[in-house]
Image (tube, rainbow, N blue to C red):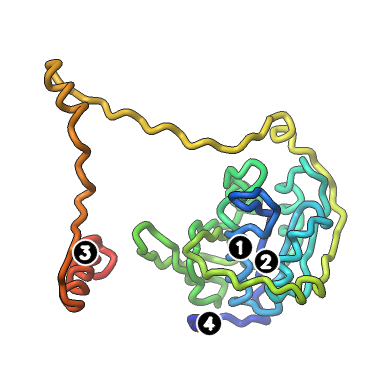
């Protein structure tokens, strides 16, 4: 059951930005997980009035996975690979009547730096909300939103319109893409000025590798102390295993932990 949102779906123009994702194991093109959450949140706020925007190749089959979420149309700013999407998106949004722009926090292909929303908000002169979890209301030229914080906490923010927001895994889970609507939906293509991304084309991309863990610096005066520190068993993270408790006792222990961590007050 979705929460009630105080939004006039016919008065507020909302745009969700989408990109082409990649399956983490096979690398096969797919809808991007976080972008799909941006579409889901946009559908909850604007319904059929939601506009979905992509800058890139309109012939990419993975785009139809977004149409399969119940969209009638997806607008594409036609660009070849290696073009700078920032320029095209800035020009389009500046000329639009958009009041809320939703995007994933990081792309699954290309650079994947997560900088596009920040650069876009800077060029437009709009406020940027990161980690958007929920929009509570949109009225009187401002929005009341919930921002996701670590450990499940939420922060309520009031932001003026128009604004740009990024979503991550705290946003509503996207609905499944249906094959029929995906094939019936329309890809509306618009030719735009192509500006080459010189920084991207000059670099060689490769899969990211996990950084090695930093060795803990042992401060010991003698060789015996250093040997003891190196061979000592790593201490646990302060966790506690509860066994043989009644459900009421287990629930009380969990509630106490949440209160101690500040999640529940």
Left or right: 34 in relation to 189: left
**Which of 125/71 is in front?**
71
Q: Quadrant of the C terminus?
A: bottom left
Furthest-right residue in this view: 191
Task: For mark 1, give the secondary structure.
Answer: strand
Residues at circles 1 and 3 in contact by the CB criterion of under 8 Å = no
Q: Is residue 91 above or below residue 215?
A: below
Query: Mark 3 vs mark 2: which is more N-terminal?
Result: 2
Residue, x 67% and y 43% (percent of image)?
110
- Image coordinates of residue 122 in percent, x first then y, are 60, 49
Residue most extreme to the front? 244
Mark 4 to mark 3: distance in Å? 34 Å
Residue 206 place in picture, x, y as percent = 63, 34
For marks 4 and 2, give the CA distance: 18 Å
Circles 3 and 2: CB atoms closer than 8 Å: no
Residue 15's disc is 2
Residue depicted at 52% across the width and 81% down the height: 5
Of 56 and 216, nearer the camera is: 216
Mark 1 nearby-residue class (10 Å; few <14, some 14–19, many ≥20)? many
Q: Which is nearer the eye, 168 or 232?
A: 232
Q: Secondary structure at mark 3?
A: helix
Whether tag 4 and tag 1 are in contact, CB under 8 A, the answer is no
Q: Which one is in front in this view, the residue at disc 4 or the one at disc 1?
A: 1
The CA distance from mark 2 to mark 1 is: 6 Å
Q: Which mark is residue 102?
A: 1
Q: Quadrant of residue 48 in the image?
A: bottom right
Judged by depth in the image, the label closer to the viewer, 3 or 2, is 3
Provide the residue designation for mark 3: 257
The answer to which image quadrant residue 242 occupies is: bottom left
The residue identified by callout 4 is 6
Determine whether, in the image, residue 39 is placed left or right of residue 253: right
Lower sequence index among marks 4 and 3: 4
């Amino acid at each position: 059951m979705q929460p009630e949102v105080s939004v006039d779906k016919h008065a507020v123009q909302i745009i969700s930005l989408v990109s082409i994702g990649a399956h983490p194991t096979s690398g096969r093109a797919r809808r991007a997980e976080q972008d799909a959450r941006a579409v889901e949140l946009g559908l909850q706020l604007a319904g059929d009035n939601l506009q979905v925007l992509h800058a890139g190749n309109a012939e990419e089959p993975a785009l139809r996975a977004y149409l399969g979420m119940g969209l009638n149309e997806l607008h594409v700013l036609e660009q070849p690979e290696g073009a700078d999407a920032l320029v095209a998106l800035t020009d389009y949004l500046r000329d639009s009547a958009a009041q809320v722009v939703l995007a994933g926090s990081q792309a699954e292909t290309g650079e994947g730096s997560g900088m596009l929303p920040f650069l876009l908000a800077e060029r437009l002169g709009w406020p940027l909300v990161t980690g958007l979890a929920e929009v509570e209301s949109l009225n009187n030229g401002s929005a009341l939103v919930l921002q996701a914080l670590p450990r499940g906490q939420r922060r309520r923010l009031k932001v003026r319109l128009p604004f740009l927001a990024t979503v991550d895994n705290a946003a509503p889970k996207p609905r499944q893409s249906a094959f029929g609507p995906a094939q019936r939906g329309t890809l509306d293509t618009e030719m735009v000025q192509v500006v080459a991304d010189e920084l991207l084309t000059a670099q060689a991309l490769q899969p990211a590798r996990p950084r090695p863990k930093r060795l803990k610096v042992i401060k010991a005066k003698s060789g015996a102390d250093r040997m003891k520190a190196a061979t000592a068993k790593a201490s646990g993270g302060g966790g506690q295993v509860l066994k043989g408790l009644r459900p009421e006792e287990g629930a009380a222990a969990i509630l106490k932990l949440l209160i101690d961590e500040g999640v529940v007050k």
